[in-house]
Amino acid sequence: MSGDLGAEVVVRAAAATLEKYANVSLLLVGDEAELRPLVTAIAGDDSRLRIVHASEVVAMSEPPAESLRKKKDSSMRVALNLVKAGDAHACVSSGNTGALMATARFVLKMLPGIDRPAIIAELPAIGGSLHMLDLGANTLATAEHLYQYAVMGSIVTSDILGIKEPRVALLNIGEEDTKGHDTVKEAAAMLQDSPVNYIGFIEGNELFSGKTDVVVTDGFTGNVALKTMEGTVGLATFYLKRAFTRSWLTRLQAILARNVLKTLSVEMDSRNYNGATLVGLNGIVIKSHGSADAVAFQHAIDTAIVEVRNQLPQQIGTMLQGERE
């Protein structure tokens, strides 16, 4: 109910999901008076799509603690309650990130052995893609937290990308063992003696080089890196458009290069990477970008479906239990 583009985006994404999967059912949680006309117009009377009424909405700017305390019938809270009760296998939301994280942690609790949840998302890279965490759930992290992120990131990447033993790297200011602060060095030592396929440190300029499948860092650094990537793409797009519109000759060159530009646009389309997982919770929660359109939100639903089929929380719990034993 509280994404930047409104409920219609979610309904259109839901309709597309039902067309794509024959054995998936969806619950749309929110104001039924607003949702019912949209569902009728866009999805018809498909019995696999049901509305669950919620009388409140968490605003995008609302403090997480306030929404958790005062809005117990928000669409976000009701959706997470459905997951906890077993009436839904996963929750997908494009609402307030802080409120979603706080509410999910309160309702679903953490998996045994996990201290804090983390946000992990898929990003484009040479030869495919990579997963990076934490992207902002926690600004600070101990070596133990980074170790837990690495374990969870390895499992998520294996499930989503189908890689048996994903390569895991720690983001650092250099590749040498002597570089970085004590927390990163301690985490590296822990990972070297673990079932994770740890390949060492990686620098920021090699994130998209194809050298690794998983990048682990604290939430402050990860969020800054993510926003920098998004800004860099915007800057490159601006310069590219300006270069092709300088004169009639450059406009002609743009026409000649349109097939190449179209391919590049598809490959770099951020909608294909929408859907960040809140890992570490005792349940599956996917955070869609607030400005996601129907295509992007549908991709977030795809991510949820993959994780449900692979029983992600159970996998994480099993690996950590094996480590403790």
Image: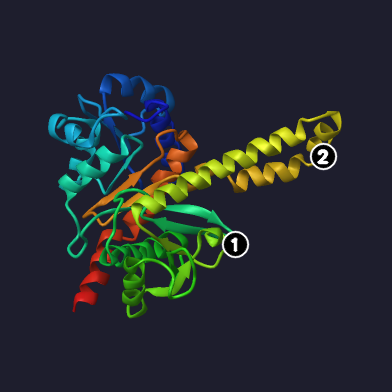
Q: Can residue 304 be seen from the camera position used here?
A: no
Tell me which residue sits at (26%, 24%) in the image.
31
Give amino acid for label 1.
Answer: Gly
Query: Toward the viewer: 129 or 65?
Result: 65
Describe residue 83's horizontal placement relative to residue 135 as left or right: left
Q: Distance between the Cα atoms at labels 1 and 2? A: 26 Å
Point out which mark residue 14 bears: none
Tell me which residue sits at (39%, 25%) in the image.
6
Height in image: 303 above or below 45? below
Height in image: 111 above or below 81? below
From the image, tell me which residue sits under label 2. 256
Pinpoint residue 214: horizontal percent, then vertical percent: 44, 63
From the image, tell me which residue sits under label 1. 127
Quadrant (top left/top right/bottom left/bottom right) for the N terminus: top left
Describe residue 320's horizontal placement relative to residue 4 as left or right: left
Query: Toward the viewer: 77 or 61?
Result: 61
Q: How many marks?
A: 2
Tell me which residue sits at (33%, 70%) in the image.
187
Circle nearer the N terminus (1, 2):
1
